[in-house]
Image (tube, rainbow, N blue to C red):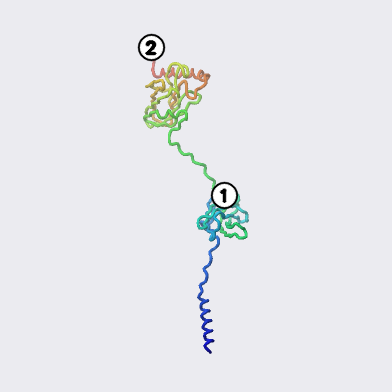
Amino acid sequence: MNAAAIAAIALSAVMLASVGAVPAHAQLPEPITVMTDKEEPYAAGETVTVTGTVSRPGQSSIPITVQVMAPNNNRVFVDQVSLGEGGQFEFMFTAGGPQWRDAGTYTINVTYGPIPANAVRASAAIEFTGGAPAPTPPPVEPEPTGPIVDPDLAGLLSGIQIVGGEIVSIAKGVNTPSIIITINAEDDGTITVPMPRSVLDSRTEGQEGDDVPFSVIVNGEISDAEEVDTTPAARTLVIEFFAGDNQAIEIIGSFVIPEFGAVAVVILAAAIVAIVAIGSRSRLGIMPRY
């Protein structure tokens, strides 16, 4: 074999070896990926979180189109999601609802691209157990943290002093010019009530005339009340009570806000006078005989 033939054979071997040494190209990433937050089946009412990435995103204004298809190929959810940094996206939806009638495999389809023919697509599947979500329980009303007070009587609460108990509520009497203070008392005690005349007063002629004593009823029985201070603006009463819960202390006058009509005052006047007379006798005891 001459030198030229040997050289040709050597050159061919080198060329074949160089071709074999060329590294294979790395596999290109998927144009779009999509995955859910868990592999286990979703129950009705659960939130499904879906994440994914577009490997070669174009304009950031182009959104991802999302569709969820039921086992019978009915569309049960549709939305559009904006791409985030690096082409990533995330969206959530709730499994269950009127259109989620059947248990089975639901398919999540995502599409990216302004032109349908050139759009990239991917899908993921979830299992749905079926059924309706548990009914939402009604909201629980918080327990009151203090006395329940009629808005018209809110200013009355700050001036009251009570020894041996606590105030539960303050309200206006029904069809009676009175204030009802409900208390819980662990011990016998007293309650001091600075009663503004603009709130409740006791006079011979409704809001006019001379002062007359308030009538006080504790748990349905007439009780003594000492008026310890009287000014043009208020009259202060000290009322005794015994230990016990849910005691109603009713202070009766001739006028309470909002003012009753003149007819109502006249009708109530006789009853008030009778209560005052009975209360006076109970305080005076047995009258001496002459």
Q: Nearer the viewer, residue 61 or 88?
A: 61
Query: In the image, 42: left or right of 192?
Result: right
At 50% across and 41% down in the image, what residue appears?
139
Q: Above or below — where is 24 with respect to 290?
A: below
Percent from the top left, x then y, of residue 60?
Answer: 54, 55
Q: Nearer the viewer, residue 28 or 220?
A: 28
Q: 139 or 283: which is nearer to us?
A: 139
Mark 1 and 2 residues: CB-CB less than 8 Å, in contact? no
Q: x, y (%) of residue 87? A: 52, 57
- Expressed as whole percent of the image width and height from the top left, the position of residue 245 reads 42, 32
**Where does the image place residue 271, in percent across and percent down from the top left?**
48, 19
Q: Is residue 186 left or right of residue 208?
A: left
Total numbered labels:
2
Q: Tag 1: residue type?
A: Ala
Residue sitting farthest toward the bottom:
1
Location of mark 2 (residue): 289
Per the rendering, the mark at residue 207 is none
Image: 124 above or below 257: below
Observer-side mark, 1 or 2, equals 1
Q: Quadrant of residue 71?
A: bottom right
- Residue picked out by circle 1: 132
> What is the quadrant of residue 278 in the picture?
top left
